Structures are given as structure tokens and as C-alpha cells.
Amino acid sequence: MKSTDIPKEEPIERRDLFTFIVSIMRMAAMFTLRTEYQNSYMHLLTTVLSWSYEIFTYFVCVHIEILFMCSLYIYYDEGDLEFLVNCLIQTIIYLWTITMKLYFRRFRYNMLNDIISTVNDKHQLRSAHGFTYVTVRGALRRSNLWIKSYVYCCFIGTIFWLVLPIAYRDRSLPLGCWYPFDYKQPLVYELVFFLQAVGQIQVAAAFASSSGFHMVLGILMSGQYDLLMCSLKNILATSYLKMGATMQELSELQEAQSVSDAEVNQYSYSVEMQTSMTELKHQKSLSNAMDLPTAFRHSLTRCLEHHRYIISVLEKMERFYNPIWLFKIGEVTFLMCLVAFVSTKSTTANSIMRMVSLGQYLLLVLYELFIICYFADVVYQNSQRCGEALWRSPWQLHMRQLRSDYIIFLINSRRPFRLTAGKIYNLNVDRFRSTITTAFSFLTLLQKMDARG
């Protein structure tokens, strides 16, 4: 986005960028409760509550997983393919929920905490001083919008199953599975319904946390790329300010750089703002006079440090997520296939509401796969645009003095960063499309098997 008429923004302050998604992780027992209390009794109480809540959620999810596995074993010979596939869907969903809870909280918690701390402590708030600038405000706004809409969709889609038994008033359960006792007895039904409700909330929170954190990181790092590209575009202006150039020299440079201002879609999430001449004078007065090559290398060094920070966070993100996204591609493929199959096979008297629930599941699965692939693609696209940003500066004015610095940076900027699934598949929009194609190929095979049976 581009705007030259927007008034100057208020200074933005550093704050926690993951407050909302971490609260969802805590709901799923995937992140520890707050324990930074100076009072030792409060610290002990919070630790006990954290452990107790985590154990309780594991009990809920594991016992539902076991019940669905027993249902598959007991009713396998009855030949009700619709019921078996429905049980298989829930088995996969709860198995993935348990896996994510363990992965985030027990297996990779230190890495997760390190990523959050690194991004919070070292992210840049605005681009370098120049004729124009961008801030992180646009990326933060877009991050909040996407993550909240995704989390609400996850909770609505899973909790909707809890509404069905209430609407039918037949003392049925949200999740139909085998129980070794009569769950319709007084008090027993209420307890079982409560445990299944907790299980569905855990499913929603675990799915929203695992994919939502990936989405938030993708948007925030794309926002950091916006800042970096604006700094590179204004690198000569920054150098002029450092060398204490006159206002006449700054005006001539600004006129030469104004050609690139007409280009649209320079940034993914940020709005470019014009720096007033008063602020330019103030920045110039704070600078120590130096020659142009030295000032340029100082400005370029700052950009290189920012670029290294972005790459380091993306490498941590890749190490954290690439093992689970490999299995996620397979899980999403089978879930889309199975949910679509059950939707087409639903023939019960209350099939309309059931199909609505299954349709929500199918849309959520597609939504989750889309955000995983799309925001990985956005990061890749931004990672290869740093060289383009440097070309937007009026490089031709000082090519003789700065040619080697430009060439070295342009050569190194040709290495785009790719997020992968298990170091095997590149995550991008093409992977999203091919996974959908594979899922519906399996659906066709499953329908043919059902017809023959």
C-alpha cells in the first residue's frame, strides 16, 4: 500500500506481540500459566494449577481417543461405513490434538519460548530514517485480524457439535462413540457430556494454536521485510543524513527517488509515510559528518543486521514447524477425504444439521491448510524482494563510489527463504492446490469401494 497524504503516525511502543495466541495456547495447556510472581506461595499455587490443568486435559483427550479406537474395533464387522469413517475422523483429530499438546508443551517448549522472546525483544518498530518510512503497525493490525478470525472460526466449528444434542433433545452425545456403560443415566450423561465438551474445546484450542502461531509469525516476519525494504529504498537518504548533507542536496536526492514512489504494492502490510522536512532537519542535526562511502556502509550494515535477524527467526520457525507440517499434509488430506465422504453418505433423519457440522469441519480443514501454505508463500515472496527494494533507491547517482557494496548485497539477496514440510515439500499455494486434488482423488476411490461393498 502507498499513501503520501496520511498524517504522521504516533510513535509506536514495543509490546508483547503474542498475547492473544499465547492465551489460546494456555487454554490448550500448550503453554505454561504465568508463574513470574515474587510471592513464593502464588508461584507454587500457579505451578500446581498449571500441572493439574495439563493432566486433566490430557485425561480428557486421551480417554476420548481410546473410546473412538474401541468403537472402530468393536463395530468394524458391522459394515456401517459411515459410522466407522466418522469414528476414524474423530480418532485422527484427537490424535493430532494430543500430539500438538505434547509437542508444544513438552518436546519443543524451550524453542517455542525462544522464538517468542526473540521476536518480542528484537523486532524493529520502524524503518530507517529517510524520505519515507513504514512501521510495524500495519502488520500488527493484520496479524490481530487474521488470528482472531481464525480462532473464532475454530471454536465455532467445533463447539457447534455441542449444540446438536441440545437441539435434538434425545440425550445423545456430541461425539457418537462406544461406552462400556449406559451413559444416558442421570448424572452420568451430564458428566460424559461435560467431558466431551471439554474435549471439543481442547481440539479447537490446539488446532488454533498450532496453525495460528505459524500464521502470526508469517505475518510479523513479512512486516519486518516491509521495514527492511523501506530502509533499503531510502538507504541513500539515510546515508545523506549521516554525512550531514545540505537541504539542497537532500531535495535533489528526493526528486531522483520520487520516481520509485509511483510503484504500487511495494509492501505486503505496511502503509508508506512521508517524512516531513522538519524531521529531516532534526535527523541531520543529530548526525556526525562523514564521507558518503562510510555513511553508506553504516546504513547498509544496519540493513544487513536486520536481515540477519529476520533470517534467524525464520530458521527457528522452520526447525520448529517442518517436522509437524509433514504429518499435517497427510492428516489434512485424509480428513478432507473422510469428511467429504461422510457428508455425501449422511442419510439419518437429522442429516441436515449433521451435514452442516461436517461442512464446518471441511471448511476449517481447508482454512487451516490455506493459512499454512499461503503465509509460507508470502514469506518466500518477500524474501526474494530485497534486491528489488535496493534498486528503488537512486543508485545511478553514486554507482562509481558504491558499486561493490551494491553488487555484494544484490548477490546475497538472491537466496530466498522457503518454509517446508519435513524438508521434503515447499509450503506454497501450489502445495495447497495439490493437496486438495490428492484428497478428492482418495474420496473418489473411497466412494468406489463403498459402492462395491
Image (cartoon, helix red, strand yellow):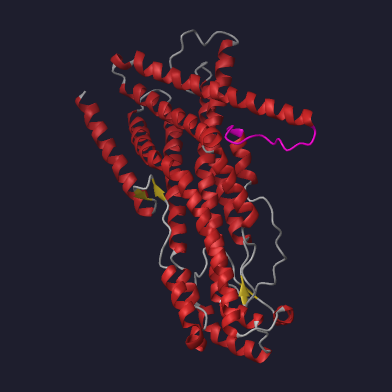
Q: Is residue 1 visible?
A: no
Nearer to us in this view, 297 or 205: 297
Q: Residue at x 25, y 37 (%)?
A: 444
Find residue 38 and report its image quarter.
Answer: top right
Nearer to us in this view, 13 or 42: 42
180, above or below 113, in the image: above
Q: Position of residue 201 (x, y in %)?
A: 56, 30
Q: Residue at x 64, y 74 (%)?
A: 129
Q: Residue at x 35, y 22 (%)?
A: 84
Tell me if 397 is positioned left or right of 452 in this view. Answer: right
Q: Position of residue 358 (x, y in %)?
A: 42, 33
Q: Position of residue 435 (x, y in %)?
A: 33, 45
What's the magenta bit mostly, secondary-structure-wise? loop
Residue 28 belongs to the span the image colors magenta: yes
Find residue 306 and report its image quarter.
Answer: bottom right
Q: Which residues are magenta?
A: 27-39
